[in-house]
Each structure stands twice: as structure tokens, then as C-alpha cells.
Image (spheres, rainbow, N blue to C red):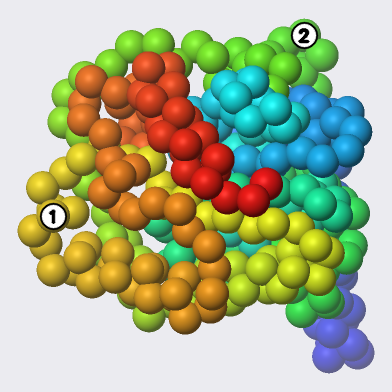
Amino acid sequence: MKYKNIVLIWSLLIFVVLFAYYFLIGHYLAQPQLDVWWIERNLAKKRVLAEEIIGKKIILLGGSSVFFGLQAKLMTEELKIPTVNMGIHAGLEVDYLLHLGEEYAKKGDIVVVSLEYMHYLYDGSNGAQKINYVLSHDKTYFENLTYEKRISYMRSIKPFDSIPSYVVGKIKKAVQWDPFEMNKYGDKIDNIGIMEGNIPAFDINKYKLDNKKGFDAIIDFAEFCMKNDIKLIFLYQTISKHEKYFNDKEYLNFFKSIASFFKENNLLVLDNPYSAMFTRKYIFNTENHLNNEGAKIRTLDIIKLLKEQEL
């Protein structure tokens, strides 16, 4: 009898724990996480802009360095092809950012991809921003993942992260979360000023240099573009100049590995790492965010290169 009671108690305890866990996950899935609300509001607007373009278009794809560093409005005016800036938070990671290209690029379109350097070193894991955004705002993407990948998402959830999201969800009606200031082309337009203080180099030591999942995602996207008659063009990431990029063997080898990857896979890249580097005068608030002046210079340079292509 005593044994049965112990089994019953443990069974009830396990049930309560599992119920609480999935209850919290339920709130996680139902409530947008605070730190990705701004991503959702910006991306929601960009999605509408992309959908409104009828016919051939150029899609600018990448992280926030694209959002801050390229001007779709200027490209539209100079190239006479409707262009939309789909650049958004790099924390959505390379697989999801390229998924946006698959979602909105159609036959005959041109996709210009400028990934952050962290994306080339992607290890296939699920970061907080991507998990939060996908589970809160893109259920369709989640449902189309393989069961293995869905499980990896669920295993990455920290249940107690759901508690603040639940509380925030209760007050969100009283709070306005406006998107970054952007124009009707998806460009960031209030990046005015110059970054103060030390501007660090990209921290390459945070990643394992032999990670290949980022390269695999790029190859998959390139195959998608080829199958769907979409022209794919790559650019290097805009970033602040730093002496390490010119003298440090680790960085030099890293840049060479990206160039070799593009060459070996016959991927069209228009520039090089150094032509995408800018002095402090053109850096806004992080090492890879250009201010308006820098973004205009970068865009004009890219327009010249694009005019040499058959668009």
C-alpha cells in the first residue's frame, strides 16, 4: 500500500511539473516576447511593402547592417527597379533571414544579400531572438520545420521566460511599440549622428571558425534562387574599419575563407571586405550600423556595381 502511495505521489508530481511546463510554453507561444516586439513591428511593415510590389523587384536581405546601411529608395530611383529593404535583426540568424528571401522573392526578381560575419560562422543552434520571434509571430514557419528542428526549438525554450511575457502581454494594449522610423521602401531614416567611444572589432573569438551551417544555409538558398530564376547577388557586411582586419592573421584568414566559399560555389559577389569598411565619421551606433551619410555613400557604390550587371 505504501509503495502504491509513493508511486501515486510521484505520478501526480510529474504531471503537475509537466502541466506547469507546457502551460508556460503555451503562454510563450501566445505572447510576444518583449525583446522581439520591435523586430515584429518593423518586419510586419517590411512584409507589406514587399507584397505591394507588382512585377520585378530587388530585395535587400540581411541583418541590421542592411537595415541601416543600404537605401532601397535611392536604388529604386537610380536603377528604375522597385526595391525593398528587408534588412532586420541579425539575431534571427542566417537560416531565417534567407527564408524571408524564399518567402518574398519571385521569378525574375533580384535578391541582394549582405550577411553579418556572425552568419558565416553559424553553428545551427537556435538563439533567443529567433526562437522568440518564430514562436510568437511566425507559426507557419515553425509548423513547416522538420520534427527534429521543432523539437530543438522547444528544447531551447526557458519556460520562466514566459512569465514576463505574460505580464507584458497584459499591459501591451496600454503601451505603443512603434517601429523604427522607416520610409516606404523599408529604409532606416533616423540614423543621424556619429558613434562615440571605442568602436571594437567584430569578436571572431565568440565563434568556432570550423562551423559550416551558415555556408550550408547559403548554398540551399542559392539552389532555391537558381530553381526559381531569381538572380542572387552577395555583398560583404558594412562595418567600421579596424586595424585587426588588416593585420591580424585570424581575421585575414576568415575573410579569405568567405571569398573562397563564394568562388568555389560560383556565387556572384560584387565587392570585398575592405570596400565595405567605413571610418568613424560614417558609423552610427554600433560597429556595423552606418549613419545616413554612410548609407548613401555605400548605396551609391553598390548602384554602380549593380549597373554593370544584367538586371
Number of other residues with Cα within 10 Å of mark 2, as a class: few under 14, some 14 to 19, many 20 or more: few
Residue 260 in view in this figure: yes
Task: Specify few, some or many for label 1: CA neighbours under 10 Å numbering under 14, 14-19, or 20 or more.
Answer: few
| Vertical order, 235 against 17 (above or below) | above
Q: Is residue 113 left or right of residue 148?
A: left
Is label 2 in a helix, a strand or a loop? helix
Q: Position of residue 49 (x, y in %)?
A: 80, 27
Badge 2 amino acid: Ala
- Is 302 placed left or right of 76 in the picture? left
Q: Amino acid at mark 1?
A: Phe
The residue under label 1 is 246
Q: Which residue is located at x 45 percent, y 53 percent?
A: 270
Q: From what the image shows, is residue 189 above or below residue 85?
A: above
Please give the label number shown on residue 307.
none
Nearer the observer, 68 or 28: 68
Label located before the other in sequence (2 or 1) = 2
**Label 1: element kind:** helix
Question: Mark 2 or mark 1: which is in front?
Answer: 1
Which residue is nearer to you in this view: 21 or 40? 40
